[in-house]
Image (spheres, rainbow, N blue to C red):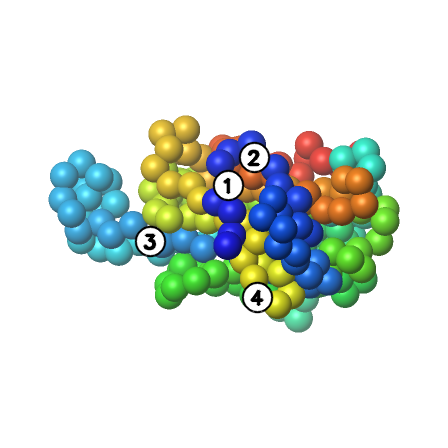
Amino acid sequence: MAINLVKGQTIDLRKNDKGESFDLSAVTIGLGWDIRKSGSGGFLGKLLGGSKEEEYDLDAIAFLLDKNGKVADLGRTIRTNDGRNISLHQGDVIFFNSQQHPSGHIWLTGDNRTGAGDGDDEQIIVKLDSLDQKYERILFLVTIYQGRQRNQHFGMVDNAFIRAVDKNGKEIARFSLSGDAAYNNMQGMIFAEVYRKDGTWKFRALGEPKPNDSFVEILKNYVY
């Protein structure tokens, strides 16, 4: 049975206190959320536009950090077919414009722009047992695309969660957040981290809100 974590709690991903063991050769970090229904009236209903249902584009991002807690490889800039320049390509940042790490050991499965449906809305899969030893930590973030422009923030998102699932589909842990006043006007969130410790991997629930709808602003704190 998966462990429901509270903010700041840390667990061992490979084996829990109940003696269950988990296969970390491919771990899915799943992100899910629900769009808050806005037709209930009152102040919140007016704030969200009456009965109109908002779309929330939450993006999952991962920073691969070295022993100093920094992103050592920021990748490169490429020009796309439509003439746009994309930075951070094929580096140690996994995001919607660079969905697979050059090692092939961590990747983002896609970009869900609405949060519709049950289960995970976005997933980052990481082969923890194969990851190069130079990576000590992986930081998992979520940002709301154009959150400031649309006046959207985590205080308006229902049932947001991050969870870790092993290769065999066994849910190891889940960390949920919704409704905390500290999340109002926050468009970014450092959700959780996975890090090496004593020959295994640990998972820590963080839930650190950030007033940024661009992960690049958060990334500035993790570069040399």
Sooner in the amino-acid sequence: mark 4 or mark 3: 3
Examine the rendered structure and indicate whether residue 83 appears above or below residue 17: below
Amino acid bearing label 1: Leu
Residue 111 placement (x, y as % from top left)? 53, 62
Sooner in the amino-acid sequence: mark 4 or mark 1: 1
Q: In this view, does 20 lie to the left or right of 114?
A: right
Q: How far apart are marks 4 and 1 (CA)?
A: 19 Å
Residue 37 placement (x, y as % from top left)? 24, 52
Q: Residue 96 has which mark? A: none
Q: Mark 1 points at which residue?
A: 5
Q: What element carries label 4?
A: loop
Q: Is residue 200 left or right of residue 172?
A: right
Q: Residue drawn at (34%, 47%), measured in percent from left and top?
A: 158
Q: Mark 2 points at which residue?
A: 9
Q: Residue drawn at (63%, 51%), measured in percent from left and top?
A: 19
Name the front one of labels 4 and 3.
4
